[in-house]
Image (cartoon, rainbow, N blue to C red):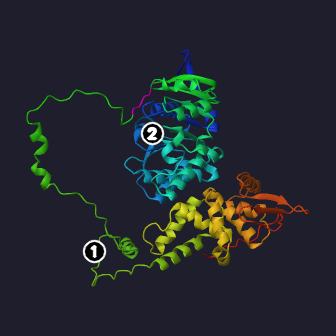
């Protein structure tokens, strides 16, 4: 079935359409300076495809929440805990509900963190819920920056990793990325390079015009045309749009954003008492209290359980003496409790559960151990979990070589670190190369084919070299570490899982 989405009119006056089914397989990149009509284009695409496919919009400015009234999108406010966002993302995939993640009001760092968590939750959904989803990310240069900015490295890696997963590996999970950016030079190249469809709008900087022309197959002289494009006009190219660059004027939309471009308005008439109106304070300003939010003290779980167990109508028994305050944990005790919570969930029953599910289980176990706050972020949890699953012992992790292994793993996606660290541990410890079944288990899948593809992926990235001995046994070498595994049988039966205590 082919769904032709009407995007507007072409240069000859004909209707310009977008093949939605092809878009789901090839992704879309939209570029244009502020005021060129990117948000209008995205709104036209969302409105025209609302009845065909599930939609998820990452909205940093809150402009797309108006889709909820007309098309039934659920608005998800970004001011939530990490566990809440991961749970919502999982249910969005499960129930196929279109939604808008509104990040309005958050600072840039929090916007990147929440968007990264939500995208990872969509990406980590169970295989049974890999339905097609159109994932639209406005202001993508914010979530996938080409260079480090003022945010922390942890947040940047989280957000950039989520965007990379969306554009590079999301297709098989049903996620079709549509990203819009003001400048291609500010967008990470590995994110932009995965798009096969392009809609290029008005831009003025030479570097952006040159990159847009290269993506569309135009020469440098033709790049000047991007300066002359009117608002709402874009040059289209791609398998879902057209085989040759064509100018498209985006059609009208049915909904409107809460914010709009500024318009000139007449000033009020001149007032003689203007200075008095501005400089004289209103007496009510001094009487108005300053609102401050005071967080309530947490109630002990035993008090809540006792209140639930009390028969209806019975008055609570007054306490004869105040409850003794629980002494605060030292940092060492807190680390021990976190390690114990991690050890509880790393067992044979958790091997094929998603990281999002394991993370929620981890947070529950931390609360049971009286740990206040969030002990680990999702990224830190995945890092610790990958180290435990690697099977490295204390002696190996205390060595200088293991530090180089962790440094190499920074360039590996979070969900692949368990496999990479397991192979590196086998090389450092002089163990046979793990079989396909063991690699698949570390990745969280039953598919041995996927395990072999992971080895091929590591080899393409230049991290490992895979070869065989004379008997056909597999060896994985790490050029940056100067070591390799012993020969191992790829078809070996999986051994019982062994996890090192941290």
Residue occupying image coordinates x 88% and y 61%:
472
Residue 312 falls in image quadrant: bottom left
Q: Residue furthest top?
A: 12
Q: In which quadrant will I find the N terminus?
A: top right
Mark 1 crowd level (few <14, some 14–19, many ≥20, 10 Å Cα):
few
- Numbered label attached to residue 27: none
Residue occupying image coordinates x 44% and y 26%:
231
**In front: 190, or 449?**
190
| Residue 234 visible in the current orientation | yes
Q: Is residue 242 left or right of residue 114?
A: right
Residue occupying image coordinates x 54% and y 73%:
341
Which residue is tagged 2?
Answer: 72
Q: In which quadrant will I find the C terminus?
A: bottom right
- Numbered label attached to residue 315: 1
Residue 270 falls in image quadrant: top left
| Residue 173 visible in the current orientation | no
Residue occupying image coordinates x 58% and y 22%:
246
Q: Position of residue 283 (x, y in %)?
A: 9, 50
> How many marks do you count on the picture?
2
**In front: 469, or 119?**
469
Query: Which of disc 1 and disc 2 is earlier in sequence?
Result: 2
Q: Does the magenta segment cover residue 467?
A: no
Q: Which residues are magenta?
A: 252-256
Q: Does the magenta segment cover residue 254?
A: yes
Disc 2 to disc 1, C-alpha distance: 45 Å
In the rendered view, tell whether residue 399 sits above or below residue 116.
Answer: below
Q: Is residue 460 left or right of residue 325?
A: right
In the rendered view, tell whether residue 131 sits above or below residue 260.
Answer: below
């Amino acid at each position: 079935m082919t769904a032709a989405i009407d995007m507007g009119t072409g240069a000859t006056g004909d209707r310009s359409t977008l093949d939605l089914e092809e878009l789901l397989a090839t992704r879309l990149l939209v570029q244009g300076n502020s005021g060129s009509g990117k948000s209008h284009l995205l709104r036209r695409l969302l409105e025209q495809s609302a009845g065909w496919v599930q939609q998820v919009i990452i909205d940093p400015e809150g402009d797309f929440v108006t889709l909820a009234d007309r098309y039934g999108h659920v608005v998800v406010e970004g001011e939530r805990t990490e566990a809440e966002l991961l749970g919502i993302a999982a249910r969005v995939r499960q129930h196929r509900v279109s939604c808008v993640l509104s990040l309005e009001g958050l600072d840039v760092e929090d916007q990147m963190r929440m968007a990264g968590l939500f995208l990872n939750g969509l990406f980590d959904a169970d295989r049974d819920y890999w339905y097609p989803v159109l994932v639209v990310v406005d202001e993508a240069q914010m979530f996938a920056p080409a260079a480090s900015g003022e945010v922390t490295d942890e947040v940047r890696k989280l957000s950039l990793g989520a965007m990379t997963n969306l554009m590079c590996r999301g297709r098989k999970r049903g996620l079709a990325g549509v990203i819009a950016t003001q400048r291609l030079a500010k967008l990470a190249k590995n994110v932009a390079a995965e798009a096969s469809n392009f809609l290029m709008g008005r831009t003025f900087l030479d570097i952006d015009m040159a990159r847009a022309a290269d993506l569309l197959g135009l020469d440098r002289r033709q790049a000047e045309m991007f300066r002359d494009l009117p608002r709402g006009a874009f040059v289209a190219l791609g398998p879902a749009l057209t085989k040759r660059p064509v100018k498209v004027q985006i059609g009208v939309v049915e909904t409107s954003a809460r914010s709009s471009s500024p318009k000139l308005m007449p000033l009020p008439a001149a007032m003689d008492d203007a200075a008095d109106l501005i400089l004289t304070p209103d007496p009510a300003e001094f009487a108005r209290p300053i609102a401050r939010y005071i967080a309530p003290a947490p109630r002990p779980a035993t008090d809540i359980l006792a209140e639930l167990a009390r028969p209806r109508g019975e008055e609570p028994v007054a306490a004869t003496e105040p409850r003794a305050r629980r002494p605060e944990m030292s940092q060492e005790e807190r680390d021990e409790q976190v390690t114990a919570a991690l050890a509880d969930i790393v067992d044979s029953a958790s091997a094929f559960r998603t990281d999002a599910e394991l993370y929620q289980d981890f947070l529950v176990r931390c609360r049971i151990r009286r740990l206040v706050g969030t002990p680990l972020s999702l990224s830190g949890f995945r890092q610790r979990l990958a180290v435990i699953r690697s099977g490295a012992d204390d002696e190996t992790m205390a060595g200088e070589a293991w530090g180089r292994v962790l440094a190499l793993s920074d360039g590996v996606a979070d969900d692949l670190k368990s496999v990479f660290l397991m192979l590196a541990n086998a090389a450092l410890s002089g163990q046979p190369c793990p079989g396909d079944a063991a690699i698949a288990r570390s990745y969280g899948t039953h598919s041995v084919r996927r395990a072999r593809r992971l080895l091929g992926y590591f080899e393409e990235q230049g991290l490992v070299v895979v070869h065989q001995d004379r008997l056909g046994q597999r060896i994985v070498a790490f050029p940056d570490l100067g070591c390799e595994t012993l020969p191992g049988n790829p078809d070996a039966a999986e051994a019982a899982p062994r996890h090192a205590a941290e």
